[in-house]
Image: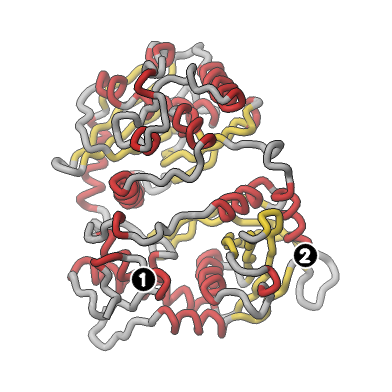
Amino acid sequence: MTQNHKPLSVDQWVLLARSSVVEITYDQSASDIISQNLLMDRENRKMWFGVTDLVNPTRKYYEVKFPGIPEDAEVIEKFRHGNNVHEMMFSWIRHFAPFAVREEEVNGEKYGLSEVRGRIDFRIGNHIIEFKTTSHDINCESDVINKNPQDLEQLVFYATLSGRLNEDHYLVYYEQDHHDRFRSFTIRISEGWDSLGFIRNRFESMVTSIRNSDSGDLGRCRYFEYGCKFRTNNICSCSKSSPIDSSSLFNNVTIRRNVELETKLEDGRINSSVTEYGSFSLWDLLIPRRVYLEKKGLFDPAEEAEPLYPDETLINVNNAVYDSGIYRERREMRIDGRSLGYFPMVSIATTPDGGVDQLERLYPVLVRSYSFEPDKLSTSRLSPFYILRLAMICSLAGSNMGYIMLGLKMDSNIAKCFRVKFRDLPVIRDKIMERIEEMEYSLSSDMTEDLPYCPSFVRDNCGSACLCKL
């Protein structure tokens, strides 16, 4: 960041994005597609289960039966820290495996388990890497089984559902609190073992327990001793339950320490170009001062007036998009070697300028929830932050058009979809890179004076450490 450089304020960025808009059109067809998914009766709507639910079915049971229980502030902070290290891990891996991929989607559809979904952390060729941060040391094979059996299960489940049974896979731990060290293990599923049957039994047991409102056969939650919100709120009965029996899995996988991989990861950690604070999301770029506090460990989640988490409407609309016939893929947005997250891509037939034939191409989509009266929602009254964020996404996706899909909080069965066409998006892309450099400079120098202020609705929510209050 040069001495004469003046960072763009969020308000200036909003105006820049608005000036890049060519037209905004309400898309009735796309709105109907998403609304039809939302209109399905809640009791008949397919319930989705993540692979993480399968490895800890009791927690999923209580999340379904007691929705809306907030996480403890300490757990939230651990989650944020884990996400930050996860971003850095990808750069460490790419230092020695430049063609590695991340967050690959898997599902159980071809095995009759269409309700099961998951995302692999990282993959090098056909070898899956499951990455975990930990506050306790994992020194040997028995520690994996005794301390973190769910991590081993998760890796085996990903290998099974992605059809990579006859390969070596890797379970990697990063213990940062005291030692900054890796512990890596090579995992291989024994030939002939029915790992799919193991998954199916776990899935059916969980579904039956939820249907019958009886968690008795699921075993103790694996977070019971590590800050479980249901234990804190005296909701669960895990104190009376036995640990989950995974003996058949333990007897049918081989685990061995992989020092060679640990050495490669440590070399990547030391020599990769990624900063110690990891990468940013697009949303981070709009709240630079808050992100500074978070990445420096100066932000106390307990002081947050209202946690900025996805609400139920947003979750439901996201699910409706993924379940619709227009969804095609999740695409990673990158700039100058930095990842800025993943966004859904949809395929909607459009008519080219001056043409008659319809073209079907992939377009990025921004999914949000809308809190106000539906009558106030129109092409001329979309939130400027919606437009800015879509412009940022489109600039990284190389598309001059994208979609804003809004779920209405006041009517959970309705979604509104708007098609936005842009021009001059390379300018937006340049501003994204400038903001990343500004934030990286601030984090490395501890100089925050020139960081733009966050939007007021975030500024008022940051507690005593806020850098925006006058």
Work out whether 360 lies above or below 143: below
The kind of residue on which mark 2 rests is: Gln
User: What's the distance in space between the residues labelled 2 and 1, CA to CA?
Assistant: 36 Å
Tell me the quarter of the image containing the C terminus: bottom left
Which residue occupies the extreme right position in the image? 356
Q: Provide the secondary structure element on which disc 2 rests.
A: helix
Q: Is residue 415 left or right of residue 250?
A: right
Which residue occupies the extreme front position in the image? 234
| Percent coordinates x, y for residue 450 in the rendering | 26, 80
At a point 37% along the width and 27% down the height, the residue shown is 222
Nearer-the-camera pick, 105 or 31 = 31
Residue named by callout 1: 460
The image's colouring method is: secondary structure
Of the numbered discs 2 and 1, the one sitting upstream in the chain is 2
| Percent coordinates x, y for residue 4 in the rendering | 26, 88
Residue 13, quarter of picture: bottom left
Q: Is residue 325 left or right of residue 91?
A: right
Q: Provide the secondary structure element on which disc 1 rests.
A: loop
Residue named by callout 2: 28
At a point 20% along the width and 66% down the height, the residue shown is 444
Q: Residues within 10 Å of mark 2 (few under 14, many from 20)?
A: few
At a point 28% along the width and 35% down the height, the residue shown is 173
| Percent coordinates x, y for residue 62 in the rendering | 48, 33
Q: Which mark is residue 236?
A: none
Nearer-the-camera pick, 119 or 36 = 36
Q: Is residue 253 left or right of residue 438?
A: right
